Amino acid sequence: MKIAYFGYDPLSCCLDVFLQQEYEYTVIYTGESSPFSDKVIEFATQNNLNLCFEKPTLAKMQLLVEQGVELFFSAEYPWKIPVPTGLKYAINMHPTLLPEGRGMTPLPHLILKHSHYAGITFHKLENDFDSGDVLLQQAIALENNETFDSLSAKIFQQTPELLRALLSNLDDVYQNSQEQGEGSYWPSISKEQQSLDWQQPTAQLLTRLRAFGSLGTYADIAGQAYIITSAHGKQYQHQYSAGQVLLDNPQQIIVATVDGELCIPKKALLFSAIS
């Protein structure tokens, strides 16, 4: 079966599954070379596959169908994919248990307050984001110390097996899909949600840092804007002001919180152009 694939690196694990199942790639849509697309580009290059960096248009999608493409598959692809007439299968992967958690950035939401909706959902690709009938889904349990990166890794590791199960009985599963129902939409994360407030308790600050992990969390430290990718903290009584720098050396910087301190390794601290 001919396939058009749409995706970025966070779910590049899906690429080999289709190759192993002897699907024929007609084109792979991804973004220009970056830390978020290099794995997809490398896969296409090694297998001599057609790459496209443009946003998909209805005319080009219709042309793919005319060329014999029967399946559109999308995994971590941010742009709208017009679904042409005559396409047999159109599938998207979403990292929540739909219909809960529609939206572009669900992982931080899962860690901050919606852990019970973590999972993998394959659903029909429709012109409205994350709205198509559910084909197959699987819950993912979050640990107490789950981070953006550890949850991303779980999704990366578990998605191929569920995809193989879907492809093993594709026509039957596709024909017996289930409507989503009302569900919920989670808006894109704001800068405020992705920032540390030194007036919050240490535990709350650490949860926020876990929710964004390598994406980075914004923080003001001594009047300078930073992005923090990891830290550890402890609680204790003190007389310092929240946000006060207690230690700054080549290895780490320690900042007082309202009920303790946050220790930030220098390797996890970046200057931010956004104040």
Image (cartoon, grey):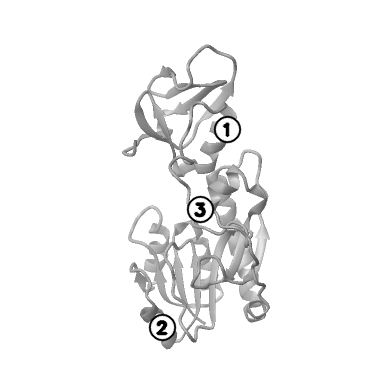
Q: Nearer the viewer, mark 2 or mark 3?
A: 3
Disc 2 residue type (three-letter): Gln
Q: Which residue is mark 2?
A: 62
What is the C-alpha distance between the residues marked 2 and 3? Answer: 31 Å
Quadrant, the C terminus: top left
The part of the image, by quadrant, that contains residue 192 is top left
Q: Residue at x 47, y 33 (%)?
A: 196
Q: Which residue is mark 1?
A: 204
SS at circle 2 = helix
Outermost residue toward the front? Answer: 182
The percent position of residue 249, horizontal first and vertical second, equals 39, 20
Q: Which residue is mark 3?
A: 187
Figure check: 169 above or below 185: below
What is the C-alpha distance between the residues marked 1 and 3? Answer: 21 Å
Q: Residue at x 61, y 63 (%)?
A: 121
SS at circle 3 = loop
